[in-house]
Each structure stands twice: as structure tokens, then as C-alpha cells.
Image (cartoon, rainbow, N blue to C red):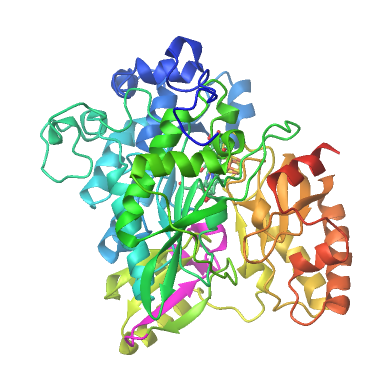
């Protein structure tokens, strides 16, 4: 198979078929009048806190998820009340940078129309939780007034494009951030539904990123068409030696190649993804493959054509098989390269090669070559809220009021106070300290390299706790680390409340994936560079068993590691888990 015109290409489940033969969501999208559905009517209905059923699928395309508070489910059922419906609202912010004015606007909004907290996500943006239906339009309008939007933050479209954190760090970081913004704008849905329903503006401002159909004067969705993509599509841009974005977890990735101080272009990766379903071996996480090199001026075209290939060939019958990783698995890399070359008019150049060192963030103050300072603040699991001992939300509000630079979100759920003049550092340190925030001497390397997904009580798919539990588990693991003299060891640990893998767990040296309340599958053996997945070590563990298994492995690591060997590599070397080089191995191990 080398050419898309080849008659061997299986087309029975892609968009060449009538929607009636495909997954019901395809028909829903097709008949939705470019995502309008009856969302407006549902929002206007005062009788319920919910919107209408199929519209809950459509609202995702506007970054809006209907949820209910799962902590209250049983009590409300017993009281014969409808679930406590509320909405998660996700901001679209390619490259993850906001101004201090935007921070202050979002902070006010979190306290006004959400649950009083801001959530920094693994895709470098903000989520609000607990927004009630009656406040939803006001909430989205306030985000727009701050110069941001939520369009395409969820749904079957290209998602928030992420790039190596902090564009001020180096020229390559600036280029990566700029590329993220260009791709994000280029692949934004054009439907006017967002403005009509949530912003309630018919007028279109030229150049407005959420302008809608009149801005193009043509078809409402010239790129996506009536049925959009088969599934979500995710793009990341990395700048070695950091792989903070986890480029191998992405449908499409770019790795900056800097030669003699100049950005030569990008090595391109395709076919990564994390999601799977427990027990369904046809679903699996996959580490992306490097397929070639493109020059900076070709990068946008690579994104457009790659997403178009998935739009045209992605599986639209079975949503569990609809991510790009399965298109790549089904059809092969040679097919993809040929199809991309056909669309671009030339093949990608051979990959140049690169080397990653870690996926983590470097916490604390760092100076750049221009003499500006950047403070990376560890934000446990990305949750920005005030606690009695640590008034993080107030601290960052106070910093935003005096800080002359910007805020850069990281894909490890942390925050960089970016672009700080040397003379401003003391004031920022003092504000953080005053609110009980900042560096803490006893914090372990494991905690500083931890990520947990949201899970309960808002995520409808959670099987176990994650964000609310990982800090407690770490409290119990830290004495074991201390006993093994491993407090400073930079070991990555990630927890997800279900196998969908929102914390990208299968790329962490220690991964805990929720199976049932209080029960987790333990995966080990991923590389610290984010290029090798972990393998299932033990299933269905409760806390005591997790502590026992990790405790003894950490003890062995302390005494048997060779040089600066990382924990993931160590667990593979001693045979605790096999090395998972390919997703097929991951599947095989799970099935046996
Ligand atoms: Fe995710 C679904 C939260 C990053 C894979 N994810 C969800 C939903 C919307 C649950 C739902 O569908 O009802 C979660 C909302 C929970 C809540 O209450 O807020 C949710 N995902 C998150 C966030 C907030 C986790 C976090 O703690 O930061 C991340 C938001 C990113 C963003 O700003 O856009 C988030 N999700 C990811 C990632 C990591 C990444 O993208 O780098 C993944 C794995 C990578 C991938 O996509 O392969 C991920 N989320 C999923 C999946 C599995 C997709 C699949 O291919 O099978 C689902 C379920 C689905 O889509 O059906 C999902
Ligand atoms: Fe929810 Fe599962 Fe994602 Fe966690 S991994 S946020 S539980 S969908």
C-alpha cells in the first residue's frame, strides 16, 4: 500500500460512506446545522439544570462539558432530585501563555461563576468546574472579553495545540509557541454557532478567531465539513532536550531541530495516543513514530494535510477505533508518508534526529540569555485554589497585580511566572512566601514530577479518585523514599482515574490507573524521556499493596541502581517489567 488511490484501501468506515452507515455521532454532527443542534433552546429551559441529551455531545465542540457533582449523586437520587448538573468549561489557549490581565479576569470568573478554583490542565490551559447552566453564557462571554475563547477546546476537532513551555526561554521556544498559535488558529472550527449561541453576537469582526462563516464568505466549515473529524486530534511541539509536552503521546508532533543556534525545522511524529479501555485489547496506548523532517515554512501545511488525512480516512463506525493512532496502525507508516507526500506535493525529508532528557519541569528560578528571570511554580495537580496553609489562588492574584511579564502554563500542570526583571524577583518571592506558597525543602522529587487527572467528583468517566487522592498517597510514599535516601530522586509518577489516560500515565515511570474505588493498576518501566511506555506490573491494588510493592522496589533501586540510572530503566533492567517498545507489546502483555 503506497498510494491513496490504491484500490486496496479499505473505505467502508470512513467519511466516503453515507452517515447512516457510520457511528450515530456522525449523523448527529451531520444533522446539527454545524453544531447548533438545539443547544440554544436547552440553555433557555428554566425547568432543568441540564441541556438536552444529544446536545451534550455538540456543546463539547465549544469547550463545554455537561457534568454532575458525583459526590452528591446518591443523596440527590434518594431525595428524588435531578443530579446536580453543572458544566466544565475549557479555555483554548494554544501554547499556554496568558497575560496578567487575563489571569486576573479568569481568577475573578472562577470565584464568580465557577467553583472558586482554576484548574491548569495537562494541555497547558485552564478549566473551570461547577459552572451552572444559568451562568454559562455569562461565563463564556467573560472569557471572550478577556481575549480568550473556548471554541474547539473539546470535540471532534483539532484540540488546544501545546508547545514547550514558556516562549521566552529561547528563540526555539518562541518559534514553537508561535507555530502552536498558527496551527491552532488555522484549524479552528469556523461555525458561527459559537458566536450565535454563547456570545449572542451576529456581527462578525474581521480577523476575529471565532468569527464564523461570514468571515470567509463561503461554506461554513470549508475544512471540517459537516461531520468534522472522526475523533479529537492532538498536536504538540517539543524543544529538546525537554520533552515536557510528551510529544510521543500525540496524534501529530513536531520536535524542533536547532542547528548551529538556528531553527532548521522539525522532525515530525505521528500516531501517538494514550486512551484505552480496561479489558478491551483492541484499544491501546501508542507511542508515536518519527516519519521525517519538515522546514519551518512547511510545518503548517504538514498539520493541515495530516489532519485532513485523518478527516478523510479515520474510522467513523467505531469511536473506540477512531483516533489517528488506529488509522496509522491499520494502514501503516508507508501509506501515511505517501499520502502526505501526495497532498503536499513532495515527501518529508529524512528525520534529522534528536535527544530528549526528561519530561519534567525545572522548578524554581531560571535566568534566560536576555537576563530575564522565570519562576516555575509547582502546582500540585494543577489545582489553583486557596487552602488554609497555602493560599495559592490569592498568591497568584497578588503576583498578577504587580508582575510586569506573563504567565506560562506547562503541560505538567505547573505555572511559570515568566519574564521577570531581576529587580522584581524579590517582590514575587515575598508575595509567594506571604501566602505559604513556593519551594518547600521536604518536597520529594517524586511529588515534583507527579501529575494526576481531575477524576472525581466532576469527571463522569472516573472509576477511582485521582486529583483528590494522589497527594495523600505521596504523603505515604515520601517516608519510604526518605528511608531509601531517594527524597531528591526525580521519579515520574502519574495517576489517572480511568484508563483514558488524561495524565498520560503510560509514559510515567510509575503509573497508577483507576480500576474501581480505591483500586489501581500499577504500570512501571517507562523511560524518563517519554519515549518508552510502561508495562502492567500488578492489577487491582489497594493502597496497602501499592505501598508494599513500590516500597520494596524503591529500596532495591536505592541499593542496586547503576550510576544515575533512572527508576523506569531500573525496573526494566531487573526484569520487574519487560521493555514496551511498541504498542503491540503493551497489548500482548495486557492480554496475557
Ligand atoms: Fe482527557 C475525556 C480531562 C488531557 C484522554 N478528559 C476527558 C473528560 C472530558 C471526561 C469526559 O469525556 O467526560 C475529562 C474531564 C474531567 C473533568 O472533570 O475536568 C478529561 N483530559 C482531561 C484533563 C483536564 C486532565 C487534567 O487533569 O489535566 C486534560 C485536559 C486537556 C486539555 O486542556 O485539553 C485532559 N485527556 C488528556 C490527555 C493528555 C493529553 O492530551 O496530552 C489524554 C491522553 C492523550 C490522548 O488523547 O490520547 C486524554 N480524555 C482522554 C480520553 C481518551 C481518548 C481516547 O483516545 O480514547 C477521554 C475519553 C474520550 O475522549 O472518550 C478523555
Ligand atoms: Fe476522567 Fe479518566 Fe480522564 Fe481521569 S483519565 S479525567 S478519570 S476521563
Q: Quadrant of residue 38?
A: top left
Tell me where the magenta segment starts and ends, as one range: 369-393
- Can residue 214 be seen here? The reply is yes
One can see residue 155 in this view:
no
Q: In this image, 106 relative to 84: left or right?
A: left
Nearer to us in this view, 213 or 553: 213
Q: Whole-percent x and y of residue 438?
A: 51, 76
- The image quadrant where one finds the N terminus is top right
How many circles with numbers are drawn on the protein? 0
Who's the residue at 36% across and 71% down the image? 263
Q: Nearer the viewer, residue 143 or 411?
A: 411
User: Residue placed at 30% from the left, 18% from the top?
Assistant: 41
- Is residue 4 covered in magenta? no
Task: Give percent across and percent down for residue 305.
Answer: 37, 41
Image height check: is 324 above or below 390?
above
Is 510 on the left or on the right of 247, as rendered? right
Amino acid at each position: 500500500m503506497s498510494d491513496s488511490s490504491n484500490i486496496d484501501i479499505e473505505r467502508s468506515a470512513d467519511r466516503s460512506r453515507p452517515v447512516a452507515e457510520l457511528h450515530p455521532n456522525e449523523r448527529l454532527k451531520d444533522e446539527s446545522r454545524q453544531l447548533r443542534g438545539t443547544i440554544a433552546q436547552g440553555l433557555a429551559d428554566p425547568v432543568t439544570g441540564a441541556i438536552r441529551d444529544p446536545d451534550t455531545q455538540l456543546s463539547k465542540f465549544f469547550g463545554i462539558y455537561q457534568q454532575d457533582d458525583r459526590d452528591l449523586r446518591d443523596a440527590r437520587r434518594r431525595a428524588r432530585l435531578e443530579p446536580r448538573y453543572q458544566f466544565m468549561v475549557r479555555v483554548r489557549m494554544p501554547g499556554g501563555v496568558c497575560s496578567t490581565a487575563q489571569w486576573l479576569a479568569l481568577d475573578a470568573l472562577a470565584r464568580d461563576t465557577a467553583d472558586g478554583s482554576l484548574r491548569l490542565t495537562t494541555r497547558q490551559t485552564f478549566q473551570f468546574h461547577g459552572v451552572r447552566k444559568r451562568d454559562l453564557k455569562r461565563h463564556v462571554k467573560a472569557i471572550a472579553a478577556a481575549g480568550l475563547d473556548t471554541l474547539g477546546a473539546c470535540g471532534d476537532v483539532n484540540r488546544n495545540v501545546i508547545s514547550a513551555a514558556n516562549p521566552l526561554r529561547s528563540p526555539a521556544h518562541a518559534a514553537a509557541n508561535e507555530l502552536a498559535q498558527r496551527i491552532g488558529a488555522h484549524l479552528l472550527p469556523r461555525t458561527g454557532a459559537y458566536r450565535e449561541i454563547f456570545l449572542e453576537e451576529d456581527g462578525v469582526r474581521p480577523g476575529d478567531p471565532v468569527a464564523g462563516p461570514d468571515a470567509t464568505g463561503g461554506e461554513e466549515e470549508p475544512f471540517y465539513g459537516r461531520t468534522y473529524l472522526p475523533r479529537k486530534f492532538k498536536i504538540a511541539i517539543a524543544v529538546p532536550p525537554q520533552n515536557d509536552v510528551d510529544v510521543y503521546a500525540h496524534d501529530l508532533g513536531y520536535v524542533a531541530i536547532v542547528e548551529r543556534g538556528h531553527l532548521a525545522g522539525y522532525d515530525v511524529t505521528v500516531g501517538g495516543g494514550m486512551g484505552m479501555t480496561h479489558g478491551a485489547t483492541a484499544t491501546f496506548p501508542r507511542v508515536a513514530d518519527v516519519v521525517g523532517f519538515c522546514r519551518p515554512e512547511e510545518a503548517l501545511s504538514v498539520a493541515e494535510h495530516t489532519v485532513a488525512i485523518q478527516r478523510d480516512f479515520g474510522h467513523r463506525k467505531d469511536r473506540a477505533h477512531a483516533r489517528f493512532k488506529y488509522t496509522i496502525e491499520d494502514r501503516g507508516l508507508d501509506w501515511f508518508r505517501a499520502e502526505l507526500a501526495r497532498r503536499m506535493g513532495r515527501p518529508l525529508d529524512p528525520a534529522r534526529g534528536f535527544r530528549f532528557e526528561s519530561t519534567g519541569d525545572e522548578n524554581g528560578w531560571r535566568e534566560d540569555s536576555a537576563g530575564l528571570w522565570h519562576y516555575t511554580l509547582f502546582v500540585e495537580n494543577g489545582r489553583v485554589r486557596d487552602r488554609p496553609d497555602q493560599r495559592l489562588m490569592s498568591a497568584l492574584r497578588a503576583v498578577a497585580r504587580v508582575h510586569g511579564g506573563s504567565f506560562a502554563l506547562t503541560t505538567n500542570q505547573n505555572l511559570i511566572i515568566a519574564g521577570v526583571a531581576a529587580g522584581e524577583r524579590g517582590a514575587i518571592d515575598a508575595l509567594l512566601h506571604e501566602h505559604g506558597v513556593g519551594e518547600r525543602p521536604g518536597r520529594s522529587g517524586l511529588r515534583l514530577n507527579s501529575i494526576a487527572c481531575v477524576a472525581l467528583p466532576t469527571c463522569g468517566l472516573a472509576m477511582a479518585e485521582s486529583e483528590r487522592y494522589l497527594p495523600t498517597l505521596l504523603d505515604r510514599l515520601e517516608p519510604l523514599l526518605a528511608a531509601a535516601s531517594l527524597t531528591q530522586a526525580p521519579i515520574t509518577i502519574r495517576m489517572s482515574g480511568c484508563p483514558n489516560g488524561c495524565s498520560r500515565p503510560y509514559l510515567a515511570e510509575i503509573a497508577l490507573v483507576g480500576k474501581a474505588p480505591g483500586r489501581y493498576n500499577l504500570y512501571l518501566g517507562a523511560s524518563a524521556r517519554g519515549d518508552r511506555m510502561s508495562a502492567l506490573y500488578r492489577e487491582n491494588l489497594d493502597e496497602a499493596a501499592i505501598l508494599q510493592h513500590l516500597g520494596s522496589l524503591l529500596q532495591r533501586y536505592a541499593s542496586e541502581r547503576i550510576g544515575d540510572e533512572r527508576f523506569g530503566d531500573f525496573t526494566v533492567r531487573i526484569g520487574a517489567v519487560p521493555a514496551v517498545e511498541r504498542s503491540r507489546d503493551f497489548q500482548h502483555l495486557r492480554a496475557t
